[in-house]
Image: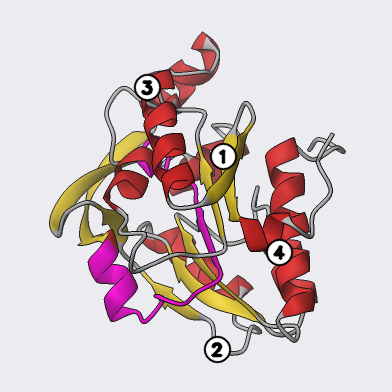
Amino acid sequence: MPTELRPSTARLLQCIERLYESRNQSVRVLQVGACDGKRFDPLFRFISTHKGVSGVFVEPIVEYFDLLVKNYQHIPGARFFNVAISDHNGISNIRLVDPEAILNKTVPEWAVGISTLERNRNAIDGILISEDNFLKIQEKTIERSVSVVEVNKFVRESHCEDYDVYLSDCEGHDYTILSAMDLDKFHPEVIFAESMLMSNKELSEIQSKLQYYGYEFEYDDADLIAYTKAVASHEAVVE
């Protein structure tokens, strides 16, 4: 694991710390694609060590969903949903690396986090990984049907409209979700999402949308972060 945080992750933690201090030590998070809540997760330590932080955690892969519930069972008020989030409702096929292969260490551990609704956008299709790892993953890739809920319907029905932080890691599907998100009705103080699998055009579209709604916008080689001016006014610039 890297010892230094990426700029976007450092900014995320700064923003959440500020929200935590300014809101009587209470922050609510909506996390989509939460996996098991622990491995490779930028918020696990903060959530686990700060009383008053809670939220809604969404994960479509049942094996990781069960671990997610276990890892966050000590968080008062936490709620968990075993669905995928998208721009439509229904049933979709999701591809993933067989959890047994990860458990048996026949593929890299990071394969736990590459389940995707997309095609030809992430590591399951060899994007941004070595040929050797791609061949290992390809042999262990499986497909399942999962329930899908449209993002605005989910926010409304799970009563997340006034949540402070939105966080997603959806392996190429973040663009679809952010494009569909109704920021007139759901306007979190902080939005953090994987951007490394977006095209330049897609990233530019999301930047324009978020800035239109009054967010400050930053990104690095992995993720984007947007935050309101109220949060920005209290933050130092990340070098």
Q: Which residue is mark 1?
A: 224
Q: Assess disc 2: are there few (<14), some (14-19) or many (≥20) residues with their C-alpha within 10 Å of its C-alpha.
A: few
In this view, 53 is above or below 90:
below
Q: Amino acid at mark 4?
A: Ile
**What residue sits 52% from the left and 18% below the top?**
128
**Which numbered circle lies on residue 77?**
2
N-terminal of the pair, mark 3 or mark 4, is 4
Q: Is residue 116 left or right of residue 226?
A: left
Q: Nearer the viewer, residue 208 or 18?
A: 208
Structural distance between the alpha carbons of marks 1 and 3: 14 Å
Structural distance between the alpha carbons of marks 1 and 2: 28 Å
Q: Which residue is mark 3?
A: 201
In this view, 49 is above or below 76:
above
Q: Which residues are magenta?
A: 152-174
**What residue sits 30% from the left and 64% below the top?**
83
Q: Amino acid at mark 2?
A: Gly
Residue 104 visible, this angle? no
Q: Which residue is mark 4?
A: 16
Q: Amino acid at mark 3?
A: Lys
